[in-house]
């Protein structure tokens, strides 16, 4: 028979999670990568093209 109870290491529902947990989420990282690429392309355009 499989034990379906939660383990002791599982986080509680009311426990606060830090910023590193938020940064580990794929949608946020994709969003930040797209914004970073747009800023990089804009800065390179301003620097390299007359």
Image (tube, rainbow, N blue to C red):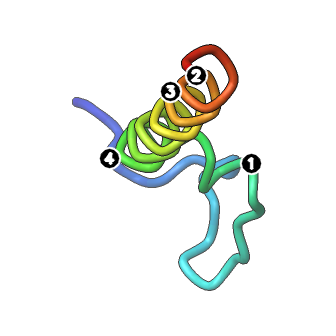
Mark 4 vs 3: CB contact within 8 A: no
Q: Which residue is mark 4?
A: 4
Location of residue 29 with respect to 8 vertically, above or below = above
Residue 43 in picture, x, y percent from top left: 63, 33
Q: Quadrant of residue 36?
A: top right
Query: Taking 49 as reference, is 34 left or right?
Result: left
Q: Which residue is mark 1?
A: 20
Of the residues under marks 2 and 1, which one precedes in the sequence?
1
Residue at x 59% of width, y 29% of height? 40
> Which label number is shown at residue 40?
none
Residue at x 40% of width, y 36% of height? 30
Query: Taking 3 as reference, is 35 left or right?
Result: right
Q: Which residue is mark 3?
A: 41
Quarter of the figure that contains the C terminus: top right
Q: Which residue is mark 2?
A: 50
> Callout 1: few (<14), some (14-19), or many (20+) C-alpha neighbours within 10 Å?
few
Of the residues under marks 4 and 2, which one precedes in the sequence?
4
């Amino acid at each position: 028979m499989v034990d379906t109870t939660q383990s002791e290491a599982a986080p509680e529902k009311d426990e606060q999670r830090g910023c590193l947990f938020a940064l580990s989420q794929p949608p946020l990282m994709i969003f930040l990568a797209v914004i970073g690429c747009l800023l990089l392309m804009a800065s390179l355009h301003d620097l390299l093209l007359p």
